[in-house]
Amino acid sequence: MRVLVIGSGAREHALCWKLAASPLLTALCCVPGNPGIATLATCLPGSVDDIPGLVALARREAIDLVVVGPEGPLVAGIADAMQAAGIRCFGPDAAAARLEGSKSFTKEICAAAGIPTAAWRRFTDAAAARAYLATLRTPPVVKADGLAAGKGVVVATTHEEAEVAIAEFMEVGRLGAAGRALVLEERLVGEEVSLFALCDGAHAIAFGAAQDHKAVGEGDTGPNTGGMGAYGPPPALTSALEQAAMERIVRPALAEMARRGTPFRGILFAGLMLTAEGPKLIEFNVRFGDPECEVLMLRLRSDLLAALVAAMDGELLSFDVRWSPDAAISVVLAARGYPARPASGGVISGLDAAGAVAGAQVFHAGTAMQDGVLVARGGRVLAVSATGTTLADAARAAYAAVDRVVWADGFCRRDIGWRALGRTPT
């Protein structure tokens, strides 16, 4: 099969790394890709937002299957456009992608399907949001209703923090159109995990789990980011809890989407809070997470391309998903100043030495080649990842690899997996 991957981050690098190992693959392309992906695939120029251009490119390259990494093109309807052109595309159509594109839409699905989730209210007026905030006994979680690249959630610890978030999102316009409407929801208490399900529109099978660290600072402090690291499998998500989440959250959502005439096909990412009452839904995403994807791909033993084809062909229930017993961890190296104003242009070296650490794999995100030299070109720049017999072994390998990367502007959290490892953050 000739496969085209859309995207340029560490998630797409991890997907290409796993797809490249498939015996079903005859050619692998990526738009626009990055220097790491270029070692595995033919990187072609283009924008992930130029859907007509991507359709034309897929036709020109005789692509059999398009795999979409980021959420933006999915919400904008890339799957619809590819399907209209007779090109198979792994990922939901625009109607089903609303599960990520609109927080309030997901809440409506939860209400219709009886899915356990936090109490919530949607607002399009800042004054009304503030008035509702004043009635709450405890500070809420403030969420931009639209896509905000992982930066549209504020878990307020005080009412004042919530007021600031309302003003920033709705009046200052820090998130643009994504923040014109927002959701105020009850803050859930428990352990947060990410569960992935492969869906064919009618059926869903569990497709791995991970636990990520959104906050920029150690001890899970500071502003939210796109993710500073992840590990898996998460000890908090027992097999019984995973089964409960599939039966009470994932499959009811799939059934409700099908009932509405908008069946969901693709990867459904359920952000869960493991509360005292059982798993509750925080949010749905409609693609592999990042950096969770890196963890999943390191642990997946099954053929990824065969799994995606099974989902598209409605053959999921006969597909055997196999996982390594090893643990995996991914540590994000970000540019100084991230997430607010990340530095750019710094020279990076030492990646061969980092990749030589036993069990380690370095995935590129915001990198570029400039005059034959690798440089930083983004906020999250590398995802230095590793496997190990135990999570502690994987962490040791990942941080040993991190320490071999030479990049003056880079920083990372040194406590990824601290709860599961039983450590006190520094």
Image (cartoon, rainbow, N blue to C red):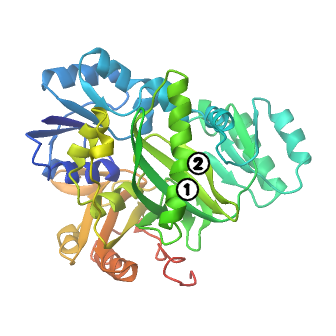
- Picture residue at 13% right of the left edge, 26% below the top: 61
Instruction: Give the residue number, with chain letter if any, for mark 1.
Output: 244
Please say if the residues under marks 1 and 2 sit with CB atoms less than 8 Å apart. yes
Placement of the N terminus among the 4 image quadrants: top left
In the rendered image, which quarter is residue 33 located in? top left
Instruction: Give the residue number, with chain letter if any, for mark 2.
Output: 248
User: Where does residue 54 sit, x and y in percent of width and height?
Assistant: 27, 25
Q: Is residue 181 left or right of residue 279?
A: right
In the rendered image, which quarter is residue 209 located in? bottom left
Q: Secondary structure at mark 2?
A: helix
> What amino acid is labelled 2 in the image?
Arg
> What amino acid is labelled 1 in the image?
Ala
- Picture residue at 26% right of the left edge, 21% below the top: 55
Q: Secondary structure at mark 1?
A: helix
Mark carried by residue 186: none
User: Where does residue 12 sit, x and y in percent of width and height?
Assistant: 30, 47
In the rendered image, which quarter is residue 244 located in? bottom right
Placement of the C terminus among the 4 image quadrants: bottom right
Relative vertical location of residue 299 with respect to residue 280 in this rendering, above or below: below
